């Protein structure tokens, strides 16, 4: 049985080898930065609150997609090491 690879190392490998994962991670980071800017404001307008909620949902959706890629990659690696 192969050695289990750490989550951080796995993500680094995907960043280096998987263009879809890189795209999702970049988009996730963009949303995180936008949310950071919004959270630094003392008060948000109703429109900004809606935008904040939308950004959080999009960011979470991207995180789920990235997690799915990580899990698929992990399964493939484990299958290869078991062979």
Image (tube, rainbow, N blue to C red):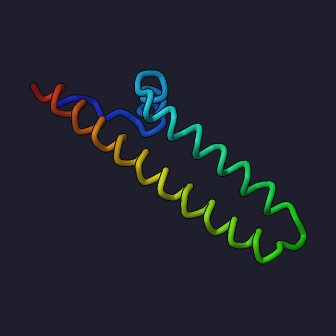
Name of the residue lying farthest toward the left: 83
Relative placement, left or right, of 77 versus 53 is left
Query: Could you say where residue 48 lies in the image, as x and y percent from the top left?
Result: 77, 68
Q: Residue at x 54, y 39 (%)?
A: 25
Q: Residue at x 76, y 55 (%)?
A: 36
User: In the figure, residue 80 lies in which quadrant?
Assistant: top left
Name of the residue lying farthest toward the top: 16
Relative placement, left or right, of 1 versus 70 is left
Question: Foreground residue, 13 or 21?
Answer: 21
Q: Quadrant of the C terminus?
A: top left
Question: Foreground residue, 9 or 20?
Answer: 20
Query: Could you say where residue 43 lies in the image, as x and y percent from the top left?
Result: 87, 73
Q: Quadrant of the N terminus?
A: top left
26 relative to 18, above or below? below
Q: Residue at x 90, y 70 (%)?
A: 42
Relative placement, left or right, of 20 versus 57 is left
């Amino acid at each position: 049985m192969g050695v289990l690879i750490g989550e951080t190392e796995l993500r680094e490998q995907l960043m280096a080898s998987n263009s879809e994962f890189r795209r999702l991670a970049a988009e996730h980071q963009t949303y995180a930065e936008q949310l950071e800017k919004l959270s630094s404001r003392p008060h948000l307008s109703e429109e900004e609150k809606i935008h904040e909620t939308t950004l959080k949902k999009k960011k979470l959706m991207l995180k789920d997609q990235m997690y799915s890629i990580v899990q698929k990659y992990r399964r493939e690696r484990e299958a290869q090491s078991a062979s």
